[in-house]
Image: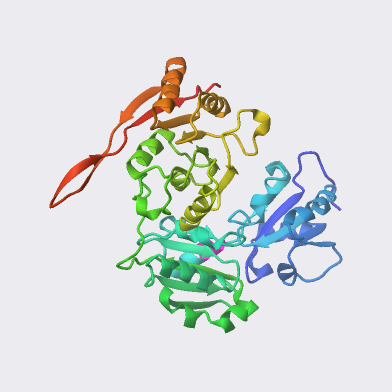
Amino acid sequence: MAEQTPNRPWLSVIGMGADGLNSLSAQARTALDAADVLVSSPRLFAMIPQDERPRIEWSSPFSATLPAIEACRAQNVAIIATGDPLCYGVGNWLLTKFPIEEMSIFPGISAFALTCARMGWPQHKAILHTLHGRDDSTIRDAIAPGARLVVLSADAKTPKTICTHLVKLGYENATISVLSHLDGSKENRIDGVAKDSESLFDAAFEADPDNDLNTVAIHCVAGTNARILSRAPGLPDHHFSKFRKMTKSELRSLALSRLAPQPGDIIWDVGAGSASVAVEFLRLAPGGAAYTFDIDEDAKEHQRENADRFGLTNLYAASHGELPLQDHDLNCPKPDAIFMGGGISKDGIEAALRFLKPGGRFVCNSVTIESEADLLSAYGEHGGELSRISIARAEPLGAVHGFKPAMPITQWFWQKENKA
């Protein structure tokens, strides 16, 4: 058994390919041979000749295996993973439990790299997405004209599920290639188009466990009626569920420009209604999350429908009531941005300003005289920027057309000081 020193890495995270030990680099093989304890799945253990070293199999969830790993700190532990452990692999989870100083990572070739190589796609021009342990609707957010997607599957049912989403969104002629057992002796490939999924991935395909280990390559080809969504804020209103409470396209665009979504940002959508602002915020803030507050019990159904339409699983109903006024009433993280489109009150505004993180952005839209008075008061006390927004849309007037104005909106924008 190797002696441990305080700063010496004791965890070796090793990425292995479909050819088992033959896929390992010289450094990875040396780390594996030097290990006192092995941690992996039954599938990967089957590729490693049995010896006297203890073997720990992953439990479900992974966290259940953590105590057994930590109990081996006095030894060298090799954790064997598939491909590149940091490409949607176990390495990401391990780094949340152990400092990198305690780990040595030996990546193998990722399924993403192998798929791009088989397809002849430059990696920087392809988009990686995973449905392993994820809601399959999340693929909807990645589908776009001309996009080249590499999707890590959950199992043999995933290819047909992906095709179902493609067809529903008007991409029935998207080309699809399903590659299984990449870089191994059993490597296989099935090519087709999304609309033919029933014959390509029939019941026999889905029932064969040999097809569970697959990666899907998609070249999105938009049909005549394809849903085409820009990433620019202010999507047309018809893309959202029909609900009486929704921030309209033009006002949504102006609000989002002020809310300034950044990767990983958290937004609170207060008086959210259909949560159209939160939905668009999330599309511009990868890895972020949205929490909604609304006293209307009907709003939750429409919020969920909109999240499904856009493939967003990180939109949560924090409260079906008013914005909480005290810290101890919170059941969600504090926000980087707050949009208040309803439920405006002096106390609510003060709570929102207090809850915002340093550097956080607050946008409040008022349509009534009473709520506008609260905004004017807040502006007078805290500063920021105050705007009056008027929009008119062309509508028929008998045989001709004229502009019909919507109710004017008073918008207050305020940004919290970003203290060091």
Tell me where residue 410 sits by quadrant: top left
236 to the left or right of 274: left
- Give the answer, above or below, for where 251 lies relative to 371: below
- Image coordinates of residue 311 in percent, x first then y, are 49, 56
Q: Residue at x 59, y 56 (%)?
A: 88
- Image coordinates of residue 209 in percent, x first then y, are 64, 77
- Give the answer, above or below, for where 340 lies relative to 125: above
Q: Is residue 77 visible?
A: no
Task: Work out which residue is located at the far front of the displayed protein and give it.
Answer: 398
- Give the answer, above or below, for where 51 lies relative to 3: below
Q: Residue at x 45, y 77 (%)?
A: 191
Tell me where residue 23 sits by quadrant: bottom right
Q: Is residue 250 visible?
A: yes
**Viewer-nearest residue: 178 or 26:** 178
Numbered marks: total: 0
- Image coordinates of residue 80 in percent, x first then y, are 71, 60
Magenta stretch: helix, strand or loop mostly: helix
Instruction: Please say which color scheme the image uses.
Output: rainbow
**Viewer-nearest residue: 236 or 136:** 236
- Image coordinates of residue 370 in percent, x first then y, are 43, 26
84 to the left or right of 41: left
Task: Work out which residue is located at the far top of the displayed protein and give it.
Answer: 381
**Viewer-nearest residue: 190 or 303:** 303
Q: Residue at x 61, y 60 (%)?
A: 108
Highlighted magenta segment, given as a residue range: 110-114
Q: Residue at x 63, y 70 (%)?
A: 18
Is 102 part of what is drawn in magenta?
no
Quarter occupied by the C terminus: top right
Task: Work out which residue is located at the far left of the displayed protein and give it.
Answer: 399
